[in-house]
């Protein structure tokens, strides 16, 4: 009796690189949120000033999502990802040269470039996952690399607390660290990445497993944007991505909320962020795993994804109570619960794009959805900055109320737009069952 050949696991090395890139991405974007209370004092910013700087990032992120998604589909994952991380690394380091005399303009300009470059991370990562994993494993794989967002967010307060003084001394150093990390990643990616069909380290058995539920091999014809934009499935995904505004609220305003409400400063923010983002990590991994379990039980992809999204939306509801509690650790736990639910939601939402669309359109669809999510974040930042300057901390009540309740409403509309999640072929025509 012959031994069964091993499938091989090179796809998990590629997944590890996606996790590394996403960690760098979120470390870079989280630094300013952690240092926000200190930078506000150093540079005499108002809440509106800070909101404008955050809006600059999101405007560029929205524009970049449209550009980068299409660019990655045209250049391919290998080259497109390198372009993205190169841009965000340069602008991330440029934060360190901003001077007090033009701090708002300088930080806004640096954040704009950072946002434009970082917008390529998720289109590239989702496209890579679609290339390297079968549908039944994609939500779990997405959950794993999506969990790296929390690793970056956790690392930021520890690094900042270790290096930066409470008066702001050494504030430039954390912005420079990611340049070195990015250079290491680019070297590894360039050396290791090829499509699985042509990769010398992918066995025939592993390739067969990767392609086990992919259907027919796609042609290489490029899809015009007009065809992608014309699909209601694109807008179902984009609507689901408006919840990005909630995640960015935790990321960019969370430290300010804890400082304004409970007096948490730059040296004791690390533990609260650790709790919040460890919970978020757990949510990302478990959320991706759960829908895979349902699929293996014989559920349709439509049922498995949507039931998982419903569970996520219900878990998130209690975050609406954060602003009415006077207990710091209860508030931190509730934010962590909301972050966990969001990351589980996000892992499954990202997978919707590759469940429905052919691989060659995935980055474009993710880019369009990311652009809509960034626009939602821009509106939220502008509103919150104004409310906090006018009404003080009571403005957080409305922010957390929306953060807790919006997922259920959005899921209802997603189901109306895409009731069956029927896959589209390589020309974006519906595949008959």
Image (cartoon, rainbow, N blue to C red):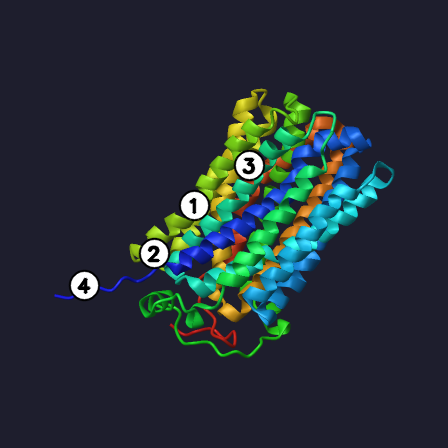
Does label 2 or label 4 sit earlier along the sequence?
4
Does label 2 or label 3 sit earlier along the sequence?
3
In this rendering, position of residue 7 left or right of residue 221:
left
Query: Which mark is nearer the camera, 2 or 3?
Result: 3
Does label 1 or label 4 sit earlier along the sequence?
4
For the question of whether residue 377 can be seen, the reply is yes
The residue positioned 63% from the left and 71% from the top of the image is 225
Location of mark 4 (residue): 3
Query: Which mark is nearer the camera, 1 or 2?
Result: 1
The residue positioned 54% from the left and 45% from the top of the image is 149
Quick one: label 1, few (<14), some, or many (20+) residues within 10 Å? many
Quick one: label 2, few (<14), some, or many (20+) residues within 10 Å? some
Does label 3 or label 1 sit earlier along the sequence?
3
In this rendering, position of residue 185 left or right of residue 252:
left
Q: Position of residue 318 (x, y in %)?
A: 51, 33
Query: Which mark is nearer the camera, 4 or 3?
Result: 4
* SS for dot 1: helix
Location of mark 3 (residue): 154
Location of mark 1 (residue): 285
Query: Which mark is nearer the camera, 2 or 4?
Result: 4
Work out how far the residue at label 2 is from the one at label 3, CA to CA, in angstroms: 32 Å
The answer to which quarter of the image holds residue 332 is: top right
Residue 295: mark = 2
The answer to which quarter of the image holds residue 226 is: bottom right
Work out how far the residue at label 1 is from the one at label 4, CA to CA, in angstroms: 32 Å
* SS for dot 2: helix
Q: Position of residue 137 (x, y in %)?
A: 38, 57
* SS for dot 4: loop
**Residue occupying the far left of the picture:** 1
């Amino acid at each position: 009796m012959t031994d069964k050949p091993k499938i091989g696991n090179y796809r998990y090395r590629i997944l590890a690189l996606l996790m590394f890139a996403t960690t760098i991405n979120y470390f870079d974007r989280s630094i300013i949120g952690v240092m926000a209370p200190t930078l506000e004092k150093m540079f005499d910013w108002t809440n509106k000033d800070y909101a404008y700087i955050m809006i600059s990032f999101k405007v560029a992120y929205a524009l970049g999502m449209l550009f980068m998604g299409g660019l990655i589909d045209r250049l391919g994952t290998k080259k497109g990802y390198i372009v993205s991380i190169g841009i965000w690394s340069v602008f991330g380091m440029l934060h360190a040269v901003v001077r007090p005399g033009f701090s708002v303009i300088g930080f806004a300009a640096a954040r704009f470039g950072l946002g434009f470059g970082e917008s390529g991370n998720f289109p590239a990562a989702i496209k890579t996952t679609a290339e390297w994993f079968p549908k039944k494993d994609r939500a779990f794989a997405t959950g794993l690399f999506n969990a790296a967002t929390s690793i970056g967010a956790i690392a930021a307060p520890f690094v900042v607390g270790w290096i930066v003084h409470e008066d702001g001394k050494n504030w430039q150093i954390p912005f420079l660290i990611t340049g070195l990390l990015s250079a290491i990643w680019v070297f590894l990616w360039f050396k290791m990445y090829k499509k699985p069909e042509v990769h010398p380290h992918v066995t025939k058995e592993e390739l067969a497993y990767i392609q086990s539920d992919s259907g027919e091999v796609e042609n290489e014809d490029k899809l015009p944007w007009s065809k992608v934009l014309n699909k209601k499935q694109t807008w179902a995904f984009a609507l689901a991505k408006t919840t990005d505004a909630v995640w960015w609220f935790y990321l960019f305003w969370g430290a300010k909320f804890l400082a304004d409400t409970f007096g948490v400063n730059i040296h004791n923010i690390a533990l609260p962020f650790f709790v919040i983002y460890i919970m978020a990590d757990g949510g990302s991994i478990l959320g991706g795993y759960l829908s895979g379990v349902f699929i293996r039980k014989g559920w349709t992809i439509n049922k498995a994804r949507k039931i998982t999204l419903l569970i996520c939306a219900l878990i998130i509801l209690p975050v609406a109570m954060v602003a009415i509690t006077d207990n710091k650790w209860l508030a931190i736990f509730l934010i962590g619960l909301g972050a966990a639910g969001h990351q589980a939601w996000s892992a499954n939402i990202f997978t919707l794009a590759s469940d429905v669309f052919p691989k060659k359109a995935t980055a474009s669809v993710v880019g369009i959805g990311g652009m809509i999510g960034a626009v939602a974040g821009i509106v939220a930042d502008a509103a919150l900055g104004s409310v906090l300057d006018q009404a003080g901390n009571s403005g957080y009540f409305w922010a957390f109320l929306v953060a807790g309740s919006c997922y259920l409403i959005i899921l209802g509309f997603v189901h109306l737009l895409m009731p069956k999640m029927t896959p589209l072929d390589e020309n974006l025509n519906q595949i008959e069952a």
